[in-house]
Amino acid sequence: MEKRDYYEVLGVNRDADITAIKSAYRRKAMEFHPDRNPGDKNAEERFKEAAEAYEILSNSEKRELYDRYGHAGPRQSGFQGFSGIDEIFSHFADLFGGDMFGGFGRRQGRGPDLQARVELTFLESMKGARKEIPFERQTRCEPCRGTGAKDGTALDSCRTCGGRGQVVQSMGFMRIASPCPSCHGQGRTIRERCPECKGNGTVSKKDSVTIDIPAGIDDGRTMRVSGLGGSGNLYIEFSVQPDPRFERDGDDLLTVVPITYTQAVLGAEVAVPLPMDDGTHKLTLAPGTQSGTVFTMHRQGCPRLERSGRGDLHARIQVVIPTHLTSEQRQLIEQLATLEHPATPPAEQPEEEESGGFFRRRKKRK
């Protein structure tokens, strides 16, 4: 895919000064930061794209090459872009390590994000609940104290980078530093791997956290739990069991109230189920209520998540036609049909017509 213009990426004019460029990059980096967009590949690409644009436009020499030759200009100086998120955090350590991003800075010492799925009943989603959420996370391997090396063995200085953790390449007048490919920026290599963690320095551990689930949580909603002691954030996705009585639409609920033909004709008092408990709301139907009529009970729907109040409950009337009748019921229905459609005297018989041909002649009466 063709790269976008760097000025367009940051949303600045071509004559923007370094202050405007830095401010624009801050906004873009906060918008597409991995912590704010977990698992979003498009946001990750936008985050890398903004970092690349800032790397070029914040450097006077690279910016001049870009302005003269486009994207081919910076490549002449050896710049090939960033390989991943970690390299961006490492390269802009002075920016992400400070308060530039208001709490969304470099994720130092943090493990990978975790995921869990929790199933709720419909009533729990309406009223809220407290749940203990089990999950697995990576913790420091105690036998090797997180080094990845077998107990009693030493770590060797990386021969590729000489223990510095970085390798430097000279590209004309430019010197480009990047993480060492052999030790991945650690500066040390393992002589003999720890048998417990296989050299990773971490082991999997089962853990749990108790959370309060707010009332009104919807199916598919995700909650973030942070501060898990060295691990990344825990993202909990909720699966709400359906209730056959209700259909959810945002904060509103729809329920179908079946009634009989006689209730529709004569009027009646019917019970509408309420979502928060086993209670009901008494609804008075006027005589002649039609099937499909909707009655709205305000503030009887779902609790509004992170807001006060509740949505509405809509009750749709459905006249149910019986499929089986007793002999007495059938007799009464037939009597009603007779009253609705009284018998009419037989009409005078029409004259007979001869058949044959397109036109027909009437027979003369004798």
Image: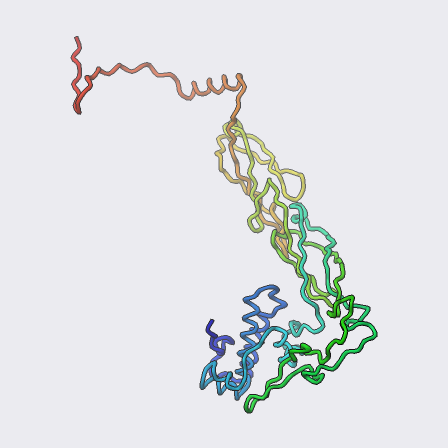
Identify the residue at horizontal 64%, vertical 56% (top origin): 237
Q: How is the image coloured?
A: rainbow
Quadrant of res 197: bottom right
Residue 363: x, y in percent?
A: 17, 14
In this view, the residue in front, 255 or 204, is: 204
User: Looking at this rendering, what residue extends furthest in the top direction?
Assistant: 366
User: Looking at this rendering, what residue extends furthest in the front direction?
Assistant: 192
Identify the residue at horizontal 76%, vertical 59% (top origin): 206
* 312 over 78 or under it: above or below: above
Residue 106: x, y in percent?
A: 66, 74
User: Looking at this rendering, what residue extends furthest in the bottom direction?
Assistant: 173
User: Looking at this rendering, what residue extends furthest in the right direction?
Assistant: 152
Residue 82: x, y in percent?
A: 57, 77
Identify the residue at horizontal 70%, vertical 64% (top origin): 226
In this view, the residue in front, 223 or 74, is: 74
In this view, the residue in front, 117 or 246, is: 117
* 219 over 256 or under it: above or below: below
